[in-house]
Amino acid sequence: MSSQIKILVSLGTCGIAAGTTPIEVALRKEIESKSLSDKIEIVQVGCMGLCHSEPTIEVIDVKSGKGTIYGNVKVDQVPYIISAGTTAKAVGCEEIEKSWYYPELEKNPGGKDQARIVLRNTGRINPESIDEYLANSGYEAFKKVLTSLSPEQVIEVVTSSGLRGRGGGGFPTGKKWAFARAQMSDDKFVVCNADEGDPGAFMDRAVLEGDPHAVLEAMAITGYAIGAKTGVIYIRAEYPLAIKRLEIAIAQAKSAGLIGKNILGKGFDFDLQIKYGAGAFVCGEETALIHSIEGHRGEPTFKPPFPAVSGLWKKPTIVNNVETFANIPAIIRMGADWFKSLGTPNSSGTKVFALAGKINKVGLVEVPMGMTLRDIIFKVGAGIKDGKEFKAVQTGGPSGGAIPASCLDTEIDYDSLRKLGSMMGSGGMIVMDEDDCMVNVAKFFLEFTLDESCGKCTPCRIGNKRLHEMLEDICNGKGTQETLDKLANLSQIIKDTSLCGLGQTSPNPVLSSMKFFENEFSRHVKDKKCDAGACKNLITFNINDKCIGCTICARNCPVHCITGERKQKHVIGQKECIKCGVCFDSCKFHAIDRA
Amino acid sequence: MTILGNGVVMGQQCQHNCGCLASDLLDQMPKEKAELEAFMNALPLTEFPERNRGFLIESLHKAQGLFGYLPEAVQAFVAKKLGLHLSEVYGVISFYSYFTDVPQGKFKINVCMGTACFVKGADKVLEEFKRYLHVEVGQTTADQRYFLGSLRCVGACSLAPVVMANDRVYGNVTTKMIPDIIAECK
């Protein structure tokens, strides 16, 4: 007898880190002990995107397809969940409302903010089972392409869908394919860029861990469209689970005859291999990525020639990002017009964002392009943590910029973000509140670029170093108005003269925060004050008369620099104080001033 | 006497003075050497040396997984197998942050410095680790036990700030938890 209830357990990297595995073990034990094995089936799925409530599980009634999601599940709640089944709500468990719908299967039922195309299977099917993928229209697009479309027609569909590169650049995907198609060459390559290096973005990992076959299917379609026989997936070595699931998926697709020689008897050959990165952010740039696959240092080279003309092993090569690929099968199945019906005229479809930072609902969301930042942060993300005030949101990671509250009503697409001096990037969205110092955050991003600059071109290697030194001066109270002028000037020079995308965008965080948070910069240089209290050399901690001598600060101080008798006012030894702020955070009587 | 390149002689003490006898490492660890050799012999090498270079990074991943780091003798071994110069292999190792040619401590403590962790105070956590272990980032304690590093985003942004001690992930880390995290490294 087939099971009546399915329980989906979210087992992506972050789910596992949050403790989903013990929940799964407890569920299996409970099912065993109640002899319900023939009625209830446990399915391991990828990330549901609900990072704020991990561990999460979903209980689904197989017949009606209706499901209930429980969040923050604890092991002792498992018996209640099993006994409630699908007929009742489990006692004492936190239920989470689904805020998304699947445009491919249904019209927006109303009240749903998210539309899932890229994440259509992620968190819904077992990523290690090709049968589940096949049961959810898997490889249908590939079969359709092989049996009824010419390569030119495939490119035409993708071009007219308006799909643009989701890795950040936003180059029209169909156009890129057409370039590669037009090249006469005995050998061509399809490369999947899974070197997700932007700190704070993890959508590609979620797709690879939750729905690897979608990427394989799309790569095979691309191969057919441009005339390539080989696909290469370049993935970060830091993603062991994604690598494992990709390996399983490739082996399954091979034995199902969907990858290999003479696929479906149509005379089309396509093979896939995985190549590993080794920790270099610049390898997300396509020419650098190609050099890395070839076993070289991952340094970018000047374009043109573009990889579509001369790429891997000097052959025409298409490099697309994971999220871009994940859109392809849906576009082929449903058509270009369907895809265009979502999003804005210049940016069709949806975009996956990784919401993180000081936001209530941290997680992965997929929304139609054109949604406002305000809706994403305050509706989908449920606003700022601890009721604090929103200050800025950083999109595009170290290549993007900080967007202030005054621009929250911007409708997000590639062009609107660029106008604000930021960019779409891969989709990381870091929300900052009143406690974050924008000078310090700009310095943080520059530290990252400095670390990751490959050193090939001078503006990026030396220019960013100088920028960082200036920001350091400002944070240490040594900055002057002249420093600010130099900072702006040099930033522009680096933008104009760097070789690759990394250098050309590295000053964006500095320039955008100087533009939108000018006041904060001038407070640092003129008054030598950091109002957010983040720049250590510009703040001091002092104990005021509200101190009742409870000694909690003295006991928590990591350097033991707070002295005083019990029930008497304490004193902070300024010389020894490392300004870590532990006393400030631990005092319950507001007796510590930060100034 | 075998000269490995850069004037290093097989059997010499390594340049780090850590007592690891880097050049002898391959012979000291015959099982690992055999495994690396078998791995590299199984690579589908072609007649085109340039294309064979494409196997360099995965070979180095394999080697570092076996030996823990990539001393010169291992680099020379890989270089020879793929028909490359030692300098070319070293060029690749020095470029990618994942590879290291110095031995690392037994316990690897890595503080995530991704953006989400940073805005939630990862810098304070890292400072406290530095103070507590008396090392800088990228260094190993004098007793060769603890390596302190920072990494960029493990993708557990909801648990920020995050610390990884070997394979264990600690979420919502505060400076107070640091002695316990170190004590739990066993």
Image: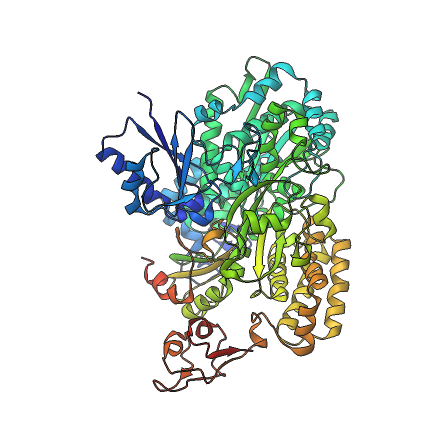
- Residue A31 position (above or below residue A547): above
Quadrant in which the C terminus of chain A appears: bottom right
**Image side of residue B172 versus residue B94, left or right:** left
Q: Which residue occupies the foreground of this view, A538 or A221?
A: A538
**Image side of residue A512 versus residue A86, left or right:** right
Q: Which residue occupies the foreground of this view, A158 or B69?
A: A158
Give the residue displayed 60% in from the left and 42% down from the top.
A292
Residue B175 spot, x, y in % from top left: 42, 66
Residue A37, quarter of the rendered image: top left
Residue A249 spot, x, y in % from top left: 47, 29
Residue A255 spot, x, y in % from top left: 46, 21
Can residue B2 be spotted in the picture? no
Q: Which residue occupies the foreground of this view, A171 or A88?
A: A88
Give the residue displayed 52% in from the left and 21% down from the top.
A258
Can residue A398 be spotted in the picture? yes
- Residue A80 position (above or below residue A454): above
State the colouring used for the structure image.
Answer: rainbow
Quadrant in which the N terminus of chain A appears: top left
Residue B94 spot, x, y in % from top left: 56, 53
**Image side of residue A441 versus residue A499, left or right:** left
Question: How many tags in the picture?
Answer: 0
Which residue occupies the extreme top position in the image? A265
Q: Which residue occupies the foreground of this view, A208 or A383?
A: A383
Residue A118, quarter of the rendered image: top right
